[in-house]
Each structure stands twice: as C-alpha cells, then as structure tokens.
Image: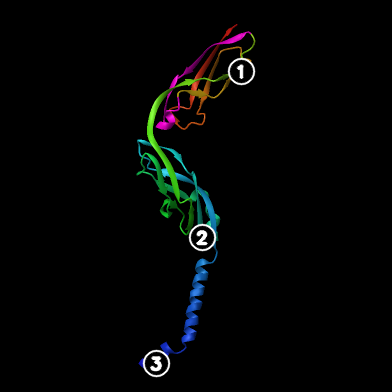
Amino acid sequence: MNRFMRKMLTENTAIKVISIMISLFLWFFVTFKGQTETSIEVPLELKNTPAEMEVLRQSVKKITVSISARERILKDIAQNDVRVIVDISNVKLGENSIPITKSSVKLPRGVEILRIDPSTVKLFVDKKEQKNIPVKAVITGKPEKGFVIDSVEVSPSNISIEGAKRELDRIRIIKTEPIDIEGLNNNLTIQAKIDPEGKIFRAEKDTVNVMVRLRRH
C-alpha cells in the first residue's frame, strides 16, 4: 500500500504540474472575466465639522475615483452609488491637509478601488461667526413721467447671517436683487431675493419685503 502511494505521488509529475497550471488559469479566467475599469467624478462630502468652525475654502469639490468590477455591476452602477466622505472633526483653524483614503470611499459590493485623485484635500478653516446686517433695496428704472420715488422701505431692515469670520468681516450691507420700477405709476410692494454678490454666508431668510412709495412730481 505504501509503495502504491509513493508511486502515485512520484510518477506523472509533469502531467500533475500541467493540471495545476490549467486549474489556476481557469480560476483566474473565471474570476477576472468581464472585469472592466472606469472613472467616476464624485462630490466630496465633509462630515463632523466642529460646531465653532467653518470651512471657508477647499482645494477641490469633486474627487475622481477609478474603479474596477464585472461589466454587469458597472453597467448598473449609478453615480450616487459612489460617495466620498471625509471626517473633519479634528481640523484646526487655518490650513489643513486631509488625506482621502479608500476608507473614505463608499462603494457597492463587488467594486474595487484602483485610484483616488486627488488623494488629499486642502481645507482652510475659520472661526464661525454670526452678525446682523442691514439690507438695502436695489431699484432700477424710472417711474412713469410725473412720478418720483418718495420712499423705499425694507422689512426686515436687518437680517442675521452666519459664516466664516473672515468672510463676514467683508460684509457691511446686503443688497436685494434689482427691482425694476420702469413706468411705475403706483406704489409697489414686492418680495425681493437677497443677492449674496459672490460672498459665502448663510442667511436666516433669503427674501425681504420691499415697499416703493411714489409721489407726483
């Protein structure tokens, strides 16, 4: 019996090696058949911002994630199935370099991450502040001939805004979007949107009431 076993183990070595290689080839073929690569641009999500801080600027808003999966999986995958979420609970005031790792990327099962670009995001963090700012109505055009503007009232006349201290320090007044009174011959009451003018802040409300009173000239 022992002689028989030794014979089985030692004879036909070449055939056994070839059989193992074929088995490995078939395993790789079945495993990786249909694997496809693609890249998806995903919005960068920041979570756990410290309550007393505000992100003033960030170097990128979107991250390109290169992924690999079977064709049928990639075919069904939607952009919102891939998320890039970075925890910034430990940021400090000033400039921060935050790594974006594979653990930051949320993917459906069966999808592999190949590359993340960029792999770091720079955040400029400032102190959060709140302040009350006066609102000014922006009037364009002219009333009908024989009429002039008697008064312009804005309600509320001040609104509370919140944001990064450096950004709020630049704001002395908030304007409304233009209110056209061309050809007007009667008093006008209107809801007007506020105009951020490119500044970054959050306001307690995005519209104010404006009353334009006319009088005969």
Question: Which of marks 1 and 3 precedes in the sequence?
Answer: 3
Residue that mark 1 sits on: 141
Which residue is found at the position 47% from the left and 21% from the top? 135
Q: For the residues labelled 3 and 2, say whether their Cβ atoms are less than 8 Å apart.
A: no
Give coordinates of residue 146: x percent, y percent: 63, 8
Q: Residue at x 51, y 31 (%)?
A: 198
In this orientation, does residue 123 appear? yes
Residue marked by disc 3: 4
Q: Nearer the viewer, residue 91 or 180?
A: 91
Spatial distance from mark 3 to mark 2, Cα to Cα?
A: 47 Å
Task: Specify the quadrant that holds the C terminus.
Answer: top right
Q: Which residue is mark 2?
A: 69
Residue sitting at 61 percent across and 18 percent down?
141
Pick whichever, 90 or 44, lies toward us.
Answer: 90
Q: Helix or strand or loop: what does disc 3 sit on?
A: helix
Q: Amino acid at mark 3?
A: Phe
Mark closest to the chain's N terminus, 3 or 2:
3
Other residues around mark 2 within 10 Å, as few (<14) / some (14–19) / many (≥20): many
Per the rendered image, the range of residues in magenta is: 146-171
Q: Residues within 10 Å of mark 3 (few under 14, many from 20)?
A: few
Q: Position of residue 177 (x, y in %)?
A: 54, 24
The residues bearing labels 2 and 1 have C-alpha atoms spaced at a distance of 60 Å
